[in-house]
Amino acid sequence: MSELDETQAIDQVIDRLSQRFPTLDRDHIVNVVHDEHEHLEEGRVRDFVPVLVEKAAKNRLKREAKDTGVVVEQPEAPASSPDTATDPDPMEVERASRDGHGSHLFGGLVGHSGENER
């Protein structure tokens, strides 16, 4: 993953978390994401950094929201898969995005000729 790709992926993480936590100030979300990103700055393999940053930042924001009583928006589950967990697997989101099947969060994870099925 190039530095530009990683920067764009981190920007997308900020956008997704801003939608997930609409009552939190976007600047705070940006700070949390950048703080989590800094923890992974020394890693040599950069491919999964955005996924790891998103997971860590989301967990941190959830804890903060719980501590302060802030309501957290739940992402909508794909219509064709009602038994899916409320949080998408970040690895699947990243894989779908890389394969060109993902658009936003759940985009392309379901309904593509079984290529994502196991």
Image (tube, rainbow, N blue to C red):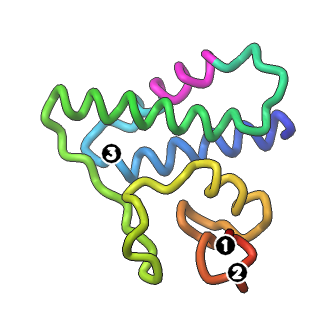
Where does label 3 land, which residue?
21
Dot 3 or dot 1: first in sequence order is 3
Which quadrant does the C terminus fall into? Answer: bottom right
Q: Is residue 92 magenta?
A: no
- Write the residue at 54% across / 60% down: 105
Q: Earlier in the sequence, mark 3 or mark 2?
A: 3
Which residue was labeled with disc 2? 114
Q: Residue at x 35, y 32 (%)?
A: 61
Name the amino acid, label 2: Gly
Q: Secondary structure at mark 3?
A: loop
Q: How many marks?
A: 3
Question: Label 1 sits on what residue type?
Answer: Glu
**Which region of the structure is painted magenta?**
31-39
Image x and y of residue 112, in percent? 69, 82
The reply to whether the magenta stretch includes residue 32 is yes
Task: Locate residue 99 relative to residue 63 in the image: left or right.
Answer: right
Report the amino acid beneath label 3: Phe
- Check whether the beta carbons of the residues at disc 1 and disc 2 lie within 8 A of each other: yes
